[in-house]
Image: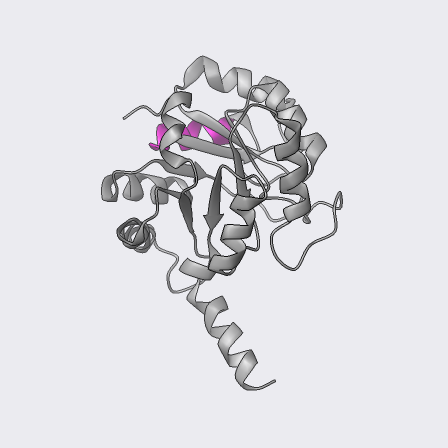
Amino acid sequence: MILTPTGLESLRSQLIVSCQAYPGEPMRDPRTTAQMAASAVIGGAAAVRVQGLADVQHTRAAVEVPVIGLWKDGHDGVFITPTLRHALAVANAGAHVVAIDGTRRHRPDGLSLAATVAGFRADSHALVMADCASYDDAAAAVDAGADLIGTTLAGYDGQRPKTHGPDLELLEQIAAAGLGKPLIAEGRIHTPDQARQALDAGAYAVVVGTAITHPATISGWFATALHS
């Protein structure tokens, strides 16, 4: 299945579930990622987002919804699918959409975001999701040719304060500008009410990860509440 920009209509007002585990955790296994993704689809996810080439491959075989893939390389600066090489590898692994760092920061291979998207288009039919941190990032990502823009990095690169929940103000700002691309809310959406608020703020679709697929964090929330 090749996902086209018009095919993104299937994601309108829908839930996207991010299925990821960190290195060293018991669930850091591509097969487990695929099982989480399949479970999320049963629960109503219209698409899933996974990290790592093997995870993308296993998840593609496990679900029939769009797979948003990424490759985290490093921990600081630009590390979400940081180069053109990373992006093409994620697409070749089977991702329908490749999520890349959509900020205006220097990229490890020296390419601009626009050059990265252009190079990607020359070799892949997958769509591009730009993970942004601010309105200026989002506007620049649209100009660069991204098919979707997300608020994934809001609060993480110093451009905006890190909000307790989703950055609703940023969502409203981008939505009001009418940039012409689907706006995906992502980041610190921990409750169904917050997901609804993100949609009401103008999001096209909502990504939820930790609150659904990261048991260590969820358990910690409950344990902390019991001992506070």
- In this view, which residue lies farthest toward the top? 122
Q: Could you tell me which residue is drawn at 31 percent across and 23 percent down?
A: 2
Vertically, is 37 above or below 127?
below
Describe residue 122's horizontal placement relative to residue 153 as left or right. Answer: left
Describe residue 149's horizontal placement relative to residue 1 as left or right. Answer: right
Say whether residue 50 is visible: yes
Q: Is residue 25 magenta?
A: no
Q: How far across and how far down the image is residue 186, in percent?
A: 54, 46
Say whether residue 105 is visible: no
Q: Nearer the viewer, residue 194 or 5?
A: 194
Vertically, is 159 above or below 137?
below
Count of numbered marks: 0
Describe residue 103's horizontal placement relative to residue 62 as left or right. Answer: right
- Quadrant holding the N terminus: top left
Vertically, is 25 above or below 152?
below
Name the main secondary structure of what is drawn in magenta. helix
Q: Is residue 89 magenta?
A: yes
Question: What span is in magenta?
Answer: 85-96
Residue 93, picture quadrant: top left
Vertically, is 22 above or below 74?
below
Q: How far across and how far down the image is residue 195, in percent?
A: 50, 52
Q: Could you tell me which residue is drawn at 30 percent across and 38 percent down?
A: 65
Residue 140, picture quadrant: top right
- Quadrant holding the C terminus: bottom right
Q: Nearer the viewer, residue 190 or 33?
A: 190
Q: How far across and how far down the image is residue 78, in percent?
A: 63, 38
Q: How far across and how far down the image is residue 69, in percent?
A: 42, 38
- In this view, which residue lies farthest toward the bottom? 227
